């Protein structure tokens, strides 16, 4: 039985609004058009605030754009990526993804999640998604088996598949569990099969993931700005903006906001054209923004709690209801806790993001500086 989400949609997204998710920018101006994601275009509807639909659609677009050059050109999946991209863009499909691992439906079940058949694979297990999965047409699924350190299989699954189970509804920013009950996935929807090094490139190669990372950090910068503005408004409302330590705290938040915006600006002004003529943001400042974003969001949300001294309630039905709602959304509710964890850990351990950043960082520049420094010292 498929517990289909279609019957219970309370917010029908405007399909025209995410056409730009499939845009392959050929100029800097077109690249900047990708800044507003589904969250902004859907008038900040909570079901799109996770950023994962933007990430998934931009990731597939990046794979498609570079399917004829290395590293994808050498993959068996190159033609499948082309067909899937054309299908999704033609249908204006909303895609989402998750980086949570698949777990057995029953504890203690040692069977692998993927079983190979003649015509495709069987997929079994359960996986955690953000609530935007209830509105998605397709799920971009990364499969990491129990004995693996990274995903090795990638598939694109329609949410109306008969053996895919979704809950009927979920609270905003809550996690939902998607179950695969021996779900059949035909070969044409298998992007990569049991090949960790291939998936590492799909997720890690700068040219393949830059568009997705750009959309992620742009959304996160907007979110950090909103939380920071809420913290400033709360400080002024409560009179705590006159306290020196609160002034210092707000100064740090504003500095963080300027920093992530500067990273994004640096990524744009140093944008370059890939082999396929796609305008891509510079990988190093983009990686720095992605690494900093979760930390900056956490700092802003915690500052909001600190300014309110843990008591963020206002008198019910007061004129301050909009501010009260924002404070609860970002600092004083279960939704706020889920949001903070998501923004900080959506891509796993932040330390891994640091490793990823330094993997693409042009370290020879640092080496040259150190050599010049010691050479200058020795000549004195």
Image: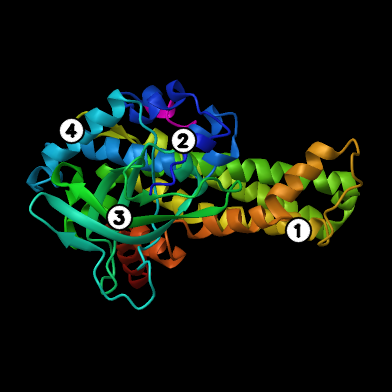
Element marked by disc 1:
helix
Mark nearest the camera among 3 and 1 is 3
Q: Which residue is mark 3?
A: 142
Q: What stretch of residues is rendered in magenta?
A: 31-37
Crowding at dot 4, Cα within 10 Å, few <14 / some 14-19 / many 20+, comes out as: some
Element marked by disc 2:
helix
Mark nearest the camera among 1 and 4 is 4
**How far apart are the alpha carbons under marks 3 and 1?**
35 Å
Circles 1 and 4: CB atoms closer than 8 Å: no
Task: Residue 6: give its label.
Answer: 2
**Residue 195 shows in the view:** no
Of residues 61 and 92, the one nearer the viewer is 92
Crowding at dot 1, Cα within 10 Å, few <14 / some 14-19 / many 20+, comes out as: some
Mark nearest the camera among 1 and 2 is 2
Earlier in the chain: of badge 3 and badge 1, it is 3
Q: Residue at x 71, y 51 (%)?
A: 251
Mark nearest the camera among 4 and 2 is 2
Q: Position of residue 271 (x, y in %)?
A: 34, 35
Q: Which residue is mark 4?
A: 83
**How far apart are the alpha carbons under marks 1 and 2?**
37 Å
Of residues 278 and 141, the one nearer the viewer is 141
Q: Position of residue 183 (x, y in %)?
A: 27, 53
The colouring scheme, among rainbow, by chain, secondary structure or one colour, is rainbow
Q: Position of residue 155 (x, y in %)?
A: 25, 49
Circles 2 and 3: CB atoms closer than 8 Å: no
Q: Residue at x 49, y 31 (%)?
A: 36
Crowding at dot 2, Cα within 10 Å, few <14 / some 14-19 / many 20+, comes out as: some
Magenta stretch prevailing secondary structure: loop
Q: Which residue is mark 1?
A: 305
Crowding at dot 3, Cα within 10 Å, few <14 / some 14-19 / many 20+, comes out as: many
Circles 4 and 3: CB atoms closer than 8 Å: no
């Amino acid at each position: 039985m498929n517990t289909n989400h279609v019957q219970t949609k309370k917010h029908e997204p405007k399909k025209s609004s995410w056409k730009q998710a499939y845009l392959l920018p050929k100029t800097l101006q077109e690249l900047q058009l990708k800044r507003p994601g589904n969250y902004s275009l859907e008038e900040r509807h909570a079901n799109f605030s996770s950023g994962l639909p933007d990430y998934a659609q931009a990731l597939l677009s990046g794979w498609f754009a570079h399917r004829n050059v290395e590293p994808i050109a050498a993959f068996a999946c190159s033609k499948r990526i082309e067909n899937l991209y054309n299908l999704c863009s033609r249908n204006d499909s909303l895609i989402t993804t998750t980086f949570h691992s698949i777990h057995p439906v029953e504890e203690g079940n040692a069977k692998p999640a993927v079983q190979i058949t003649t015509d495709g694979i069987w997929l079994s297990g359960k996986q955690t998604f953000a609530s935007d999965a209830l509105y998605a047409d397709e799920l971009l699924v990364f499969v990491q088996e129990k004995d693996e350190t990274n995903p090795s299989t990638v598939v694109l699954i329609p949410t109306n598949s008969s053996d895919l189970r979704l809950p009927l509804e979920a609270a905003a920013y809550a996690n939902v569990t998607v179950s695969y009950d021996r779900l059949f996935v035909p070969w044409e929807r298998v992007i990569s099969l049991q090949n960790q090094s291939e998936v590492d490139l799909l997720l890690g190669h700068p040219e393949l993931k830059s568009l997705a990372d750009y959309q992620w950090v742009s959304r996160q910068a907007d979110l950090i700005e909103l939380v920071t503005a809420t913290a400033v408004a709360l400080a002024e409302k409560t009179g705590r903006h006159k306290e020196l330590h609160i002034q210092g705290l707000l100064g740090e938040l504003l500095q963080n906001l300027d920093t992530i915006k500067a990273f994004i600006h640096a990524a744009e002004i140093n944008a370059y054209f890939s082999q396929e003529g796609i305008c891509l943001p510079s990988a190093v400042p983009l990686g720095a923004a992605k690494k900093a974003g979760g930390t900056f969001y956490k700092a802003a949300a915690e500052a909001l709690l600190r300014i309110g001294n843990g008591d963020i309630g206002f008198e019910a039905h007061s004129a301050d209801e909009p501010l009260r709602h924002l404070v609860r959304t970002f600092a004083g509710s279960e939704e706020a806790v889920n949001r903070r964890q998501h923004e900080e850990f959506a891509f796993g351990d932040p330390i891994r993001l640091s490793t990823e950043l330094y993997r693409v960082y042009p370290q020879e520049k640092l080496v040259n500086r150190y050599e010049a420094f010691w050479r200058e010292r020795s000549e004195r």
